[in-house]
Image (cartoon, grey):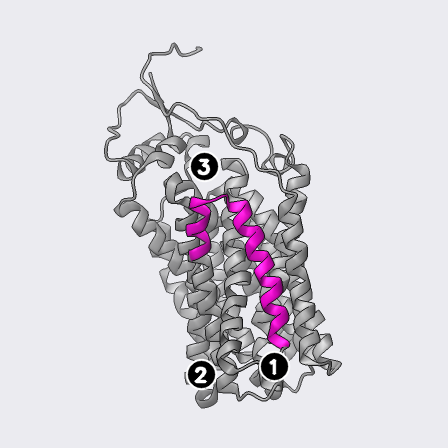
Amino acid sequence: MRHLDVQKLCDEARFSKFHLLLLLWCALIIIFDGYDLAVVGIALPSIMRDMNVAPTSAGFMVSSALLGMMIGAVFLGTIADRIGRVPAIVICLLLFSVFTAAAGLTGDPVTFGIARFLAGLGIGGVMPNVVAQMTEYSPRKIRNTMVTLMFSGYSVGGMLAALVGKAMIERYGWQSVFLAAGIPALLAPVIWKLMPESLAFLVRNQREARLKQILPKIDPAYVPQQADHFTLHDKGTETGSPIKQLFADGRGISTVMLWTAFFMCLFMVYALSSWLTKLMASAGYSLGSALTFVLVLNFGAMLGAIGGGWLADRFNIKHVLIVMYGLAAVSISLLGVKVPVGALFFLVGLAGASTIGTQIVTYAFAGQFYPIAARSTGIGWASGVGRSGAILAPIVIGFLVSQSLPLQQNFIAIAIPGAIAMLAVCLIKVRRAPPEVAMSSAPEVDPI
């Protein structure tokens, strides 16, 4: 009997057409996800005017989706390790597409909030699953780059929302940008058919025929044989509750610190995503100019994600994160300082790179921190706990906006979590798994 370590085969594979197609599919899903998430911040001034809601109430409307994201990240991240990652991803895609479109048909804050909550279940649930998917299948040498390239689709979605908003909101109303979000639901059957299932799920459920179809696409040198037996070198993936794995083997304190980093980073991300347009409009910029800042924010986020992933593959990813969180605290605090427009655009781009971009690198870090079969669970719980920061951010900043404080104080409130996240990452202990042998052709006797 020949034993094949499927994770080691993926780790040592060369980049191929298989990896490119998986990257494109996952990136496309994240683009849709990013659009659905950013669309509320883009349309918020128009929604507040049409529904006649105050800033604090608007903060609660935005946070309804974020509450759904917290629940979706934990539940749909955890359940994916049980039912399979592809079914979980398809469920999430349908949730956020259908109910974001439904929010465009509402006319009052309560119904809008309910629709956004249901959409949030899918928006939050899809993130840990696609990150786990890319982490599992990517070659080790370019893993961080692959994950961050995929997740840069989040920023592309945000820029797409800003462009669609500029083109459609003033002409067709804010509802139009929500209705457009229903289109990706049409791709659900295609994704169900074409996306490969999690390796850990296939090994755990003894889907050997499917593994023999997938693995030659990853490594053409592998030729399936009838007696092949598939394993995972990470023993922690084979038994035990995925949730317990988050605290096993000395990971307890580090898990809590990772949750803290997620909380603080998501606070910054959603404070900026929800209120940057409104804050810039209140500073005297027109709606079109304020939306341009959102474009710059997301363009910076894309550069930060890709650049951060490239650096993380060449240096210690933990050290890269510490620097990025420090840049977030500095750049956001400077947004309230009166500077030339060119310098302001640079600061907004740097803020996007060091918040949204850093969050993407943090997802990549979390994807490598946990055992394989608990990976979706680990990312899901970190993302879910972190969502409480995302929920609080629009409410807290909405309250500050309603107090008519100086612009700089609003941005300092958004910047402080960056310093806290930097300290939390410093306290995370990274343990490296010992090297394993990928394949053993020596015969073994079955214990029957």
At label 1, which amino acid type do we have? Lys
The image quadrant of residue 118 is bottom right
Quadrant placement of the N terminus? top left
Residue 104 shows which numbered tag? Answer: none
Residue, disc 2: 166
Residues at marks 3 and 1, CA–CA distance in whole angstroms: 53 Å
Residue 172 is inside the magenta segment? no
Under circle 3, the secondary element is helix
At label 2, which amino acid type do we have? Lys
Looking at this view, name the residue that lies furthest to the right: 403
Residues at marks 2 and 3, CA–CA distance in whole angstroms: 43 Å
Residue, disc 3: 201
Sooner in the amino-acid sequence: mark 2 or mark 3: 2
Instruction: Measuring from the top left, give residue 182's x and y in whole percent.
Output: 43, 70
Instruction: Measuring from the top left, give residue 78's x and y in whole percent.
Output: 56, 45
The boundaries of the magenta stretch are 307-336
Residue, disc 1: 338
Under circle 2, the secondary element is helix
At label 3, which amino acid type do we have? Phe
